[in-house]
Amino acid sequence: MIRKPIFLLLALMSLFFGCTQKELDDTGISAPDTGDVPVTFLAAANSQTRGTSMSGTLNEDASFRVYATKQRKEGNVLVDQPTYYIRGTGDDDIVTYQRIAVTGAEQYRWVWKTAKDYFWPQENYFVQFYAVHPASAPVIADILANKSFTYDQTNPYDGNHDLMWATAATTRESAGNGSFKDPSDKSNSTVKLQFHHALAQISFYGKLSAQFKNWGWTVEVGGITICNINGGGTGTFQPQQYATALDPDNLIFTKADPAVLCNYTMSMNAGHLIVNETTVTKDGDNNDIPLTSPTDVTMVIPQKPTGWNPATETTGTETPATKGCYLAIQMKIYDAQNYYQLGSADSYDTVFVPFETGVYYMYDQIAWQADTKYRYTLEFGGGYNASGEEVIQPMTITTAIQPWDSTTIDSEAKH
């Protein structure tokens, strides 16, 4: 009489643990099982991250955080509300570059995966993936209710990390198509993530004014700081329908209001900070050489800054008394006889220059846009002092705009 219930219980347990296609539990996690199919990723970025060439793939030492929801479908119709698939709030959800066996002990492919395995739900589920790079970026607290991550006074964006995002909307049965040599092999189902830049890239170049050139003067630049930039903002993923799953989601990045004013000190291009011509200095390949670092590039949140007005905001002493945007530039100016007009042999003086996006369309100033490079050429000029008074003569600033080049994800994972 005692053995029968035990036998039935063991039989039920055998049926339960014999399933190779498990549903996820309430946390969106299923325990590892050799019969399940773990989710892996192919990840590519635009051809540059900051200033470094990427050749279409993220750096192998990079990492990002991924979030996902799942939703049951019938055909191409979604029939219920999204539920959690990957929450993306802990270290287990950080995705890194790893070498793992995909189809057998002798066949390896370099792919991206989470530290803890997440397994595909059944094929009648549609999964929406959201990814944010770097992994240190603020987390999305609740991917079901609010697909947003926020920078604020406690965590302002510092201009030194290339904030990127990616999305993918797919199912287990379609994720593998084009990812590996045998598209029909669903055990190879892999998610493609094409990363996009969320920020704008800022670089500075330099040349002399015609007047400074006529006087035989030379400018030496010690540093450039962009002051009163809004360093807070919110990135929000926009909803996507299953019918348009092949199109990437949009990410709308809005600046904080009220503004989180920050100062970004630029990394400089050592060895190229002497300006003595009316044209930008060129390298051996006839490319212009920047004053700021070509690789350690500062990036800003999309916004439309208002420049400092030195004609009306004139009460500054050490720095301009303004919430407007300006450049603080450490400079020396000396003539052909090495007589210093500004600064000295041992020290720089700081001058100030009003700064805004510098781009207008139909008399309206255009905001800095994500995924865009802005190249500013400073024509020296001595700028202004903190009280808004001219130092010898003002500087002028010209702007050139260039999009970051895009690269598609290779259809084949790297061997």
Image (cartoon, rainbow, N blue to C red):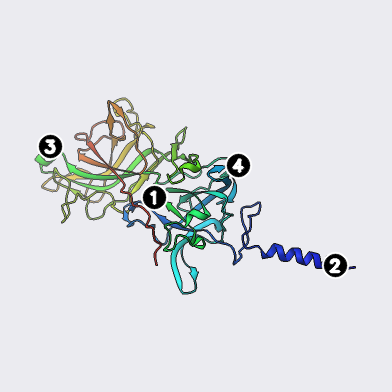
Do labels 4 and 3 touch, CB within 8 Å? no
Q: Nearer the viewer, mark 4 or mark 3?
A: 4
Label 2, secondary structure: give it.
Answer: helix
The kind of residue tagged 2 is Lys
Residue where numbered disc 2 is placed: 4
Residue where numbered disc 3 is placed: 211
Q: Residue at x 79, y 64 (%)?
A: 9
The kind of residue tagged 3 is Gln
Q: List x then y, in percent, for residue 320.
A: 34, 34
| Alpha-carbon span between mark 3 and mark 1 | 36 Å
| Alpha-carbon span between mark 2 and mark 4 | 42 Å
| Alpha-carbon span between mark 4 and mark 3 | 68 Å
Q: Of the residues under marks 4 and 3, which one precedes in the sequence?
A: 4
The kind of residue tagged 1 is Asn
Viewer-side residue, 58 vs 262:
58
Label 1, secondary structure: give it.
Answer: loop
Q: Nearer the viewer, mark 1 or mark 4?
A: 4
Task: Judge the density around disc 1: few (<14), some (14-19), many (≥20) Cα neighbours within 10 Å.
Answer: some
Q: Residue at x 22, y 38 (%)?
A: 382
Residue at the limit of the structure toward the bottom, as seen here: 106
| Alpha-carbon span between mark 1 and mark 4 | 38 Å
Residue 150 seen by the camera: no
Residue where numbered disc 1 is placed: 160
Q: Of the residues under marks 1 and 4, which one precedes in the sequence?
A: 4
Q: Of the residues under marks 3 and 1, which one precedes in the sequence?
A: 1
Q: Of the residues under marks 3 and 2, which one precedes in the sequence?
A: 2
Q: Is residue 108 left or right of residue 359?
A: right
The kind of residue tagged 4 is Gln
Q: Quadrant of the N terminus?
A: bottom right
Q: Of the residues under marks 2 and 4, which one precedes in the sequence?
A: 2
